[in-house]
Image: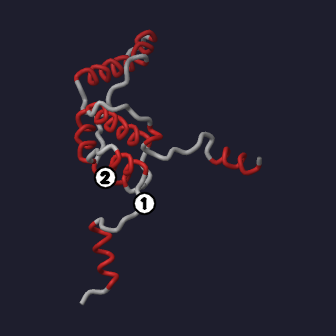
Amino acid sequence: MHSRGARDRVAALSGQVTTMGTKIEDFLKDKKIDPRRILAASVKIERLQPEDRAIRLTKRLARGSEDAAKKKEAASTKKPRSGRPVTDRTLSAALHGKPISGPAKTRLLRAVNKILEQKKQEKVELSALFDLPKKGGAAAEGAEAAG
């Protein structure tokens, strides 16, 4: 009737085939966090607030002025929210172990920490969710191999 290959493809698409999970996937299962909650929390956290718009306005006005004191004042202000929440695509890429950008990892971390805070659990570091490269990159690896 159906070939074995077709059955394997259907099983793979439906998620029935067990594979080794990524670090973030294992963490979410361990803490019993639904990925949809991450999306909702991220939308709430990253949404632009009036204070963020005010920060952007002062920076824009300071750029236009010639006064050096105003420029320094604008540079020292608090950083505004990005206004860009974690997307479904970003979350699925993280869960499948595909590379994602640094800011996207940070947004995921903020959303996870918000959920953990609601569950009255300890906040986590970025290294608890992702495999981070060692400092120094390829240069450090070459030094370790030579030494």
Above-or-below relation of 46 to 145:
above
Rendered position, 6 above or below 45:
below
- Identify residue type, mark 1: Met
Residue 110's disc number = none
Question: Which tag is nearer the camera, tag 1 or tag 2?
Answer: 1
Q: Where does the image place residue 133, in percent across and percent down from the top left?
A: 55, 45
Which residue carries the number 2 mark?
89
Q: How far from the left and from the top, in percent, is residue 112?
A: 33, 38
Q: How many marks?
A: 2
Q: Residue at x 37, y 24 (%)?
A: 79
Q: Quadrant of the N terminus?
A: bottom left
Point out the tag, 1 or 2, that comes first from the N-terminus: 1
Q: Nearer the viewer, residue 91 or 60?
A: 91
Q: Quick one: SS at disc 1?
A: loop
**Residue displayed at 64% across by 48% down:** 138
What distance separates the C-alpha of mark 1 from that of mark 2?
20 Å
Mark 2: secondary structure: helix
Three-letter amino acid code of the residue under disc 2: Arg
Residue sitting at the far right: 147
Q: Nearer the viewer, residue 91 or 25?
A: 25
Q: 10 Å neighbourhood of mark 2: few (<14), some, or many (≥20)?
A: few
Image-quadrant location for residue 113: top left
Residue bearing the label numbered 1: 20
Report x, y in % for residue 37: 24, 43
Q: Where, by quadrant of the figure, is residue 65 drawn?
A: top left
